Image (cartoon, helix red, strand yellow):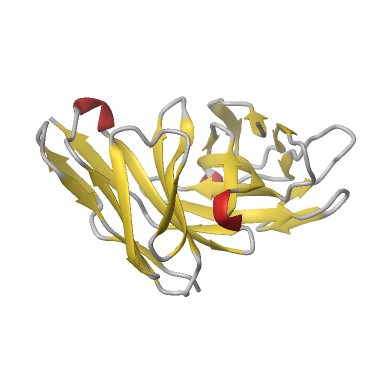
Amino acid sequence: DVKVTQSSRYLVKRTGEKVFLECVQDMDHENMFWYRQDPGLGLRLIYFSYDVKMKEKGDIPEGYSVSREKKERFSLILESASTNQTSMYLCASSLRGSLHFGNGTRLTVT
Amino acid sequence: GDSVTQMEGPVTLSEEAFLTINCTYTATGYPSLFWYVQYPGEGLQLLLKATKADDKGSNKGFEATYRKETTSFHLEKGSVQVSDSAVYFCALSEKKGGGADGLTFGKGTHLIIQP
């Protein structure tokens, strides 16, 4: 079974802090994704990566950046956290179309 | 761009009732179609998928048929259980930059099953 692990289930950060969300997958998948999930808005793609050091913007990249230095790890970075980034963040990896998700990180920015 | 529309709910049913969650899509090509389920406090899990027209995906008593003529992929189950209470997401495949296989999701349908 594919395992996608997100390092934190819950995080509370202050406005203006730099925040790192970490995601690791164990199946050697090329593609990795970061989504945020908000009530009434569903899942929205923030960034994705199709190979090491390769990244592309999704639908809502503003205020975020990503890093993929190793194939198994994909990090989401909030350069200066704001209250409107309070959300559930979901990481996923994929091979041949099906996405495999982690359990999510619920981030609260106060 | 490609998009997915599904009923948002919440949908509330009694145990053993018949379930239908509607999903329609707009796509330029011939995408694969998926249903994902999210149980409380967890990430999304793949429930079933279909890769071409008239294919039927099935899993855990749930079924959905890829209907190209109506651009639909409705999720059905003959007799729901309390344990089926969850949020269900319809999705279609989409090629992203670099050839990455991504998904476009509907907004999710919250299903509540009462004993």
Q: Position of residue A29 (x, y in %)?
A: 50, 69
Above or below, B69 against A56 in this view is above
Q: Nearer the viewer, residue A62 or B35?
A: A62
Q: Quadrant of the C terminus of chain A?
A: top left
Position in image of residue A63 (x %, y %): 28, 34
* B5 sits to left or right of A14: right
Q: In the rendering, at what x and y percent does residue A65 appear?
A: 30, 45
Image quadrant where residue B72 sits: top right
Residue at (47, 40) in percent of width and height: A58
Corner quadrant of residue A86: top left
- Residue at the spot x=72%, y=33% of the render? B25
Looking at the rendered structure, the number of numbered marks drawn on it comes to 0
| Residue for point 40% across, 37% down | A37
Q: Nearer the viewer, residue A7 or B35?
A: A7
Expressed as whole percent of the image width and height from the top left, the position of residue A104 reads: 34, 50
Decide if residue B4 is on the left or right side of residue A69: right
- A95 or A6: which is nearer to us? A95
Position of residue A51 relative to residue B74, above or below, is below
Please state if A53 lies on the left or on the right of B97 as rendered.
left
